[in-house]
Amino acid sequence: MAEPFDFPHPIFVGGVGRSGTHPMGHLVAADPRYTWVRTETRFHASSGGLPDLYRDETTMSEFLAQMRGRWWKRGHRQHQGLQRIIDREDFDAALAAFERDYEADRVAASRRLVKALLDPSAERKGTPAWVEITGEVVEEAPFLLELFPRAKFINMVRDGRAVVAGTLRKADLTDDPMRALHKWRDMVQAAADAIADVPADRVLTIFLDDFTAFDREGTFERLVEFLELDDPAPMRVYFDNEISSERAHVGKWRERMAPQDARMIDRRYRRLVKRMHRKGIEWAPEPRPEERAPKLLGR
């Protein structure tokens, strides 16, 4: 029997780390229709997960090992992972059903697995749907739309220099600024490739600096329209009280990096954005007009 696809439909929020995915997830969950899934579940979008299994780029045994390993319990103190949202007995039962049914209908089995693990979060809160945050969900939007044809995706994007600055300040990420910038570039490119294969009304790209500082009202209205909200008041309260340029450290990226790193990243970033714009990725954020370009060495 085919499953109905009318509302409720899930909302997936993705983007490079430090791009505002978590504030956006909490904001969407301020609407009474949605519950925030309180961990990045990852298995449905990250490398080695459901999309790779579907494309035969990983095996069932490898996928299940990751489900029972790093996606069940992860983080510096092992407090994150699927363990936060489902008990072990229900988790094991969901995996057993998935493994049993997968080859008969890969899409239906994958859909049932996601719902078995994520739906209880909404059910406990008494909401009809959920919003989930995993960085790579936009990159895997074509696959996820096969599972949830009415799903919507919010693509959070941020000035790559600010992403680098935020990444360098996280102990569990990297201390190499160029590596952080290259990750930003690769994820933006992958998201752009995926968006090209998704209906325009299913993806909303939001620039964090506009959202928090430079175009708050316009960006909020775009979000309300995208989510088809009849009453944006609950989200409005959260937006006014919790979303701010100060919390997002807008314009503070230079202060959050060593001066030599800031100069290097600034030069590389400006060239990178120009190349992206030439390739049609117009939403890659360029430096604001009032910013001065760095002087070249030797001048």
Image (cartoon, rainbow, N blue to C red):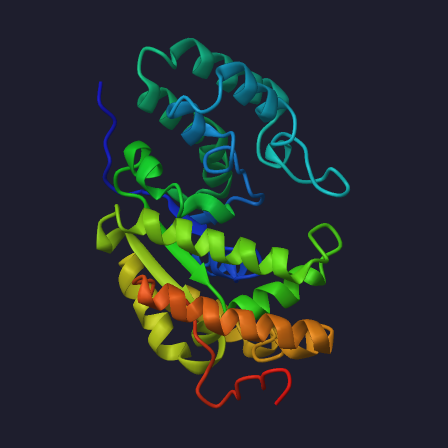
The answer, for residue 31, to whether it is visible in the render is no
Residue at position x 34%, y 64% from top? 223
Which residue reaches farthest front?
298
Q: Nearer the viewer, residue 26 or 120?
A: 26
Q: How many marks?
A: 0
* Image position of 134 with respect to 22: above or below: above
Image x and y of residue 179, in percent: 62, 55
Q: Nearer the viewer, residue 116 or 252?
A: 252
Residue at position x 33%, y 49% from top? 193
Tell me the quadrant of the picture where the N terminus can be found.
top left
Question: Where on the picture, by quarter, is residue 283?
Answer: bottom left
Tell me the quadrant of the picture where the C terminus can be found.
bottom right
Question: Where on the picture, by quarter, is residue 146?
Answer: top left
Image x and y of residue 78, in percent: 74, 37
Residue at position x 30%, y 38% from top? 145
The answer, for residue 110, to whether it is visible in the render is yes
Image x and y of residue 2, in percent: 22, 23
* Image position of 238 with respect to 173: above or below: below
Left or right: 223, with 77 as reference point: left
* Image position of 263 with respect to 127: above or below: below
* Image position of 86 with respect to 13: above or below: above
Residue at position x 52%, y 62% from top? 20
Question: Where on the picture, by quarter, is residue 5?
Answer: top left
Image x and y of residue 91, in percent: 56, 22
